């Protein structure tokens, strides 16, 4: 289920983004970025519609995924 990021409280959204960018295996290429930079990049991707916040009713977990990946699932 896609959750509109605008409907999530600012604190919750910040926590979700911080958890997402701090996961093992999150790759930002060869350049190192600070946590604040990573959070900003993900927030901007959400605002531009390039990424979406999803919630799995099956697992009870939230994730942030590229929007085109979700469109592929829905087709």
Image (cartoon, helix red, strand yellow):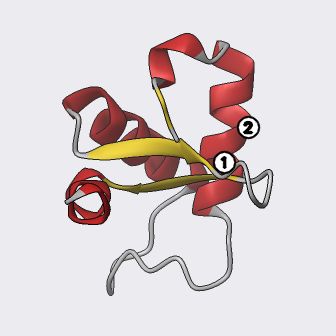
**Residue at x 47%, y 14% (from the top left corner):** 6
Pointer 2 and pointer 1: residues touching (CB < 8 Å)?
A: yes
At label 1, counting other C-alpha atoms closer than 10 Å, the crowd grade (few under 14, some 14-19, many 20 or more) is: some
Q: Is mark 1 on a helix, strand or loop?
A: helix
**Residue at x 19%, y 60% (from the top left corner):** 75
Judged from this view, the residue extending furthest toward the right is: 60
**Residue 12 visible in the shown view:** yes
Residue wearing tag 1: 18
Q: How many marks?
A: 2
For residue 22, what is the image quadrant? bottom right
- Residue 25 against residue 26 in the figure, above or below: below
Whole-percent x, y for residue 3 in the image: 52, 30
The one nearer the camera, 51 or 56, is 56
**Residue at x 52%, y 76% (from the top left corner):** 26
Q: In this view, does 73 lie to the left or right of 17?
A: left
The one nearer the camera, 68 or 56, is 56
At label 2, counting other C-alpha atoms closer than 10 Å, the crowd grade (few under 14, some 14-19, many 20 or more) is: few
Whole-percent x, y for residue 57 in the image: 72, 48
- Residue 67 against residue 25 in the figure, above or below: above
Whole-percent x, y for residue 65 in the image: 41, 58
Whole-percent x, y for residue 61 in the image: 75, 53
- Residue 19 against residue 46 in the figure, above or below: below
Q: In this view, does 41 lie to the left or right of 3?
A: left
Residue wearing tag 2: 15
């Amino acid at each position: 289920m896609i959750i509109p990021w605008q409907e999530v409280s600012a604190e919750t959204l910040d926590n979700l983004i911080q958890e997402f960018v701090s996961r093992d295996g999150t790759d930002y290429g060869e350049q190192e970025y600070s946590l604040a930079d990573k959070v900003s990049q993900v927030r901007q991707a959400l605002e531009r519609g390039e990424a979406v916040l999803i919630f799995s009713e099956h697992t009870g977990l939230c994730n942030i995924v590229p929007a085109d990946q979700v469109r592929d699932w829905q087709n």
